[in-house]
Image: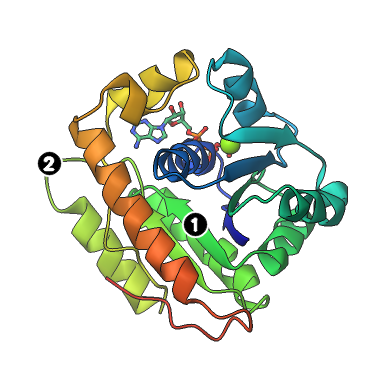
């Protein structure tokens, strides 16, 4: 089982959106995927309530239950486990990051988001788990994302070469318990999620259990 955590101290950066989309992409790729929703807001679990399809499984649990839930997922044969976390929660986020093979840090490109990410990155660095910033809700106009990536590289953070655009489809799809791959198949959003999923999967499979894997930078 490979475990991918979505962590960011900043609220609204896209943790839940990316966890759901990546887990559905894994399911569509024929993998047994599941999500543990560790956020008391339980947005991922509410999405699953609205969803008709049974997979991916979404389980809501407090961070204090993380270890037994990880064991249960492993026993259930889950191949790809996504951990959705709450913002503003240092101790829980640290616990989650330590348990994961890879941490994804969704980040918007505005200056307030970039400033906030420094805190997230600094405390995650203490865990030794490879971490990758995923630029999310990127505007199709201007070069904000390029400037954001440059700024993050300057902070020696790893930045995912696949960016996620700002698209209304991401919010709309979730209303009916779907994701963009199901709501608007063949669209730009579905296509970029496919590329993100492929990149993340290759990365997480190359990371050794000792966390010594090199995280690609784009
Ligand atoms: N790429 C995107 N394009 C457009 N809207 C987006 C995108 N990503 C996320 N959103 C929207 O931004 C809002 C916040 O996203 P989301 O809930 O995934 O963030 P979060 O990090 O999980 O938030 P929280 O910290 O509160 O758990 C939602 O309304 C979501 O639909
Ligand atoms: Mg969330």
Front residue (pair 2, 146): 2
Q: Is mark 2 within 8 Å of ligand 1?
A: no
Q: Circle 2: is it few (<14), some (14-19), or many (20+) Cα within 10 Å?
A: few
Query: Residue 114: x, y in percent?
Result: 41, 57
Pointer 2 or 1: first along the chain: 1
Asked if residue 138 shows in the view, the reply is no
Residue 165 occupies which quadrant of the picture?
top left
Answer with the quarter of the image where residue 94 lies.
Answer: bottom right
Q: Quadrant of ligand 2?
A: top right
Horizontal side of residue 93 vs 138, given as left or right:
right
Task: Where is residue 180? Give x, y as percent.
Answer: 34, 28
* Residue at the image position 59 percent from the left and 72 percent from the top: 122
Q: Element at badge 2?
A: loop
Visible residue check, residue 25? yes
* CA separation in Å, label 2 and label 1: 23 Å
Q: Dividing the image into 4 quarters, which one contains the C terminus?
A: bottom left
Who's the residue at 71% across and 58% down the image?
96
- Residue 191 lies left or right of residue 50; in this view the side is left
Give the quadrant of the N terminus.
Answer: bottom right
- Mark 1 closeness class: few <14, some 14–19, many ≥20 residues within 10 Å: many
Question: Relative to 131, does residue 187 appear above or below in the rendering?
Answer: above
Q: Residue beneath label 2, please?
A: 141
Q: Position of residue 88 (x, y in %)?
A: 68, 48
The residue sitting at 61% across, 59% down in the picture is: 3
Scheme of image coloration:
rainbow
Label 1 secondary element? strand
Question: Disc 1 designates what residue?
Answer: 105
């Amino acid at each position: 089982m490979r475990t991918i955590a979505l962590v960011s101290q900043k609220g609204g950066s896209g943790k839940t959106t990316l966890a759901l989309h990546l887990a559905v992409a894994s399911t569509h790729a024929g993998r047994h995927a599941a999500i543990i929703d560790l956020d008391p807001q339980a947005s991922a679990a509410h999405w699953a309530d609205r969803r008709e399809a049974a997979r991916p499984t979404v389980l809501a649990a407090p961070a204090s239950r993380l270890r037994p839930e990880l064991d249960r997922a492993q026993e259930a044969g889950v191949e790809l486990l996504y951990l959705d976390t709450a913002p503003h929660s240092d101790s829980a986020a640290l616990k989650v990051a330590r348990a994961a093979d890879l941490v994804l840090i969704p980040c918007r490109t505005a200056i307030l988001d970039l400033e906030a990410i420094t805190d997230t990155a600094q405390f995650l660095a203490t865990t030794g788990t490879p971490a990758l910033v995923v630029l999310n809700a990127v505007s199709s106009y201007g070069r904000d994302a390029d400037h954001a990536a440059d700024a993050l590289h300057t902070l020696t953070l790893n930045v995912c070469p696949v960016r996620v655009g700002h698209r209304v489809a991401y919010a709309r799809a979730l209303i009916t318990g779907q994701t963009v791959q199901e709501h608007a198949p063949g669209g730009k959003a579905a296509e970029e999620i496919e590329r993100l999923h492929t990149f993340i999967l290759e990365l997480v499979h190359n990371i050794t259990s000792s966390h010594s894997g090199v995280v690609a930078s784009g």
